[in-house]
């Protein structure tokens, strides 16, 4: 079982501002859907609130300390460990952690792979992705895209794998 992060992050590691993405990149949304469909996804409650609903064709697991939090199509757990345990029952391959910032920081020791859409700009934000430690992860794939009529900023699909010691 592989625990993977999937995220869009700016050059200065911003992933959100006021519980929203600071950019609009339709190809990133397609990539996210393509990569996560059929796999369990784990997220914090604020990330779920930003989505507004459970994502189809994925087991949606939301981490929340609020025991009364409920929403259609999701399973709520109180901790990252509980989320990973539950997700392992639904996965025959990858479990995707989709955010937010606190969840990424907390889950980093468990992460085997990072799928990062690197947004080629600096943004103001209040949620941040942990910097990549090149002694822990190596870039194994990238696919760079220039801005176009649907994407105001350049972006790079990157895959980083943990370096096995």
Image: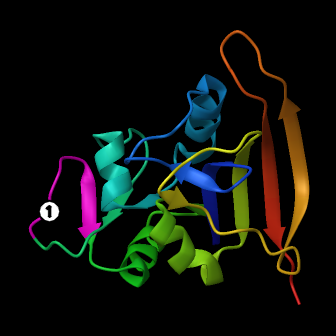
Quarter where residue 34 is shown: top right
Q: In this view, does 145 lie to the left or right of 47?
A: right
Residue 57 is situated, as x and y percent measured from the top left of the image, at: 42, 41
Residue at 45% in and 63% down: 90
The residue segment tinted magenta is 68-76
Residue furthest to the front in view is 124
155 is higher (above) or lower (below) than 12:
above
Residue 13 is situated, as x and y percent measured from the top left of the image, at: 66, 57
Work out whether residue 97 can be spotted: no
Question: Residue 37 in magenta?
Answer: no
- Closer to us: 67 or 9: 9
- Closer to us: 80 or 60: 80
* Secondary structure of the residue carrying numbered label 1: loop
Dominant secondary structure (helix, strand or loop) of the stretch shown in magenta: loop
77 is higher (above) or lower (below) than 38:
below
The residue indicated by pointer 1 is: 69
């Amino acid at each position: 079982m592989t625990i993977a992060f999937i995220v869009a992050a700016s050059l200065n590691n911003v992933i959100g501002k006021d519980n929203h993405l600071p950019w609009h990149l339709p190809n990133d949304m397609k990539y996210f859907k393509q990569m996560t469909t059929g796999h369990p996804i784990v997220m914090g409650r604020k990330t779920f609130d930003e989505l507004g609903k459970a994502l189809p064709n994925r087991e949606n697991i939301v981490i929340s300390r609020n025991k009364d939090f409920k929403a259609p199509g999701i399973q709520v757990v109180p901790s990252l460990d509980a989320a990973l345990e539950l997700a392992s029952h639904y996965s025959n391959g990858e479990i995707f952690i989709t955010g937010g910032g606190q969840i990424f920081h907390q889950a980093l020791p468990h992460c085997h792979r990072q799928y990062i859409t690197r947004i080629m700009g600096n943004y103001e934000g209040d949620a941040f992705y942990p910097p990549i430690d090149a002694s822990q992860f190596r870039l194994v794939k990238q696919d760079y895209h220039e801005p176009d009529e649907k994407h105001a900023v350049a972006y790079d699909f990157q895959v980083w794998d943990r370096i096995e010691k």
